[in-house]
Amino acid sequence: MKRSLLVAAGLTLLAALVLAGCGGGGSSGGTTTNTTTANSNFKAALISDIGKFNDKGFNQSQLAGITRASQQLGIKKITLQSNSSSDYLPNLTTAAREGAKIISAAGYLLAPTLSTVASQFPKIDFTITDDSVHGPDFAKAKSVKNIQGLVYASNQAGCLVGYLAGEMVKAKGGKQVIGAVGGIQIPAVDDYIVGYNYCAKLADPNIKVLVGYSQDFVAQDKCKAITQNQIGQGSQVEFQVAGGCGLGTLSAASQAGIWGIGVDVDQYNLAKRVLTSALKHVDVGIYVAVQQAQKGRFHGGTDLLFDLKNNGVGIGRISPEVPNAYVTKMNALKAKIIAGTVNVPVAKGSDLLGLLPGAKVGPT
């Protein structure tokens, strides 16, 4: 089936927002409405997933995106936090009944509920982060005409951090082992890990990549325990792909004197030994979708793809301990990915299979 795709490449707005960064704090309350004061009657809503708005990553970044939209576009924002999956339905319906013109679901986990609610409110625009409207999650939907997917090539960001990890471990010697700790095992998590695995081996063909899942995006102790187990097996670098839970991975890596790698946002300052971070500019996706809806240019039934080519994904601050030669080699690899001469594999079930040219399934 041919997919409808709107590539965000070339948008001056996208590049400008990525370079400027999006400010905004997190919310730790339950499902309390937070509506800004603005001159416009246009309302935009954001519903968090169970990672909550204070996760220092995925959800908090999207909160920053809608906050920036309220400040720069003059819209009114409604932010509703989901403390459990049972909050998805009441939060989505509350936003609709409070007059939101566009409602953004903060992640893949909200897809089944979003599909139902969107069909009940056909005049409202909906977006979902990390999911395609043409993927299996919406296969049974009555209609996706008022839903837009915000899809990120996180395999490419995972590739860049994996390549640096491989170079650093190869140079240090000893056991050629690195690790990755995922949260709930979903394609959006696995895409990061597949890219990490693939490109670490481009740098160091002899490297072994350990992978574990906490099945949680919140409890730091769960990720910390998995990380410590991998370190016990000789891991020299640990990549967290588990939201707030993964902060336990960064902590354990620092305590063991090895490198940690952050995810989604720049997490360089969240621990003492952070090599870099794999970035996914979900804040920009929210901003772009809100602006489209405000201007009457929302394109339901399509996906927006954010990748290296349009700066939708990337790499965060790199430790000064990383030799410049490795950064140069990583940038050369990045250029090849953008040019299409290197195709980073994706996870089984990934929406990127239908969106990224040349994408094939790779091992986690």
Image (spheres, grey):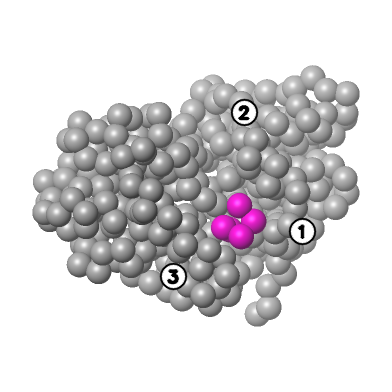
Residue 258 visible within the image:
yes
The one nearer the camera, 109 or 39, is: 39
- State which tag comes first along the sequence, 3 or 2: 2
Residue 69 horizontal/vertical position (percent): 74, 34
Task: For mark 2, give the secondary structure.
Answer: loop
**Residue found at the very far bottom of the displayed protein:** 1
Q: Name the residue: 13% across, 50% down.
A: 234
The label shown at residue 300 is: 1
Q: Marks 3 and 2, Cα distance to the nearest angstrom? A: 32 Å
The answer to whether residue 24 is left or right of residue 83 is right
**Residue 159 lies within the magenta run:** no
Q: Quadrant of residue 256?
A: top left
* In the depicted structure, whether residue 292 falls above or below residue 352: above
Task: For mark 3, give the secondary structure.
Answer: loop
Amino acid tagged 1: Gly
Amino acid tagged 2: Gly
**Residue found at the very far front of the displayed protein:** 325
Badge 2 crowding class, 10 Å Cα cut-off, few under 14, some 14 to 19, many 20 or more, is some
Amino acid tagged 3: Pro
Q: Are discs 3 and 1 less than 8 Å apart at CB?
A: no
Residue 119 visible within the image:
no
**Quadrant that contains the N terminus:** bottom right
Residue behind mark 2: 23
Residue behind mark 3: 345
For the stretch drawn in magenta, the main secondary structure is loop
* In the depicted structure, whether residue 265 falls above or below residue 199: above
The stretch in magenta equals: 307-311
Q: Marks 2 and 1, Cα distance to the nearest angstrom? A: 27 Å
Q: Quadrant of residue 158?
A: bottom left
Q: Name the residue: 68% across, 47% down.
A: 15
Q: Nearer the viewer, mark 2 or mark 1?
A: 2
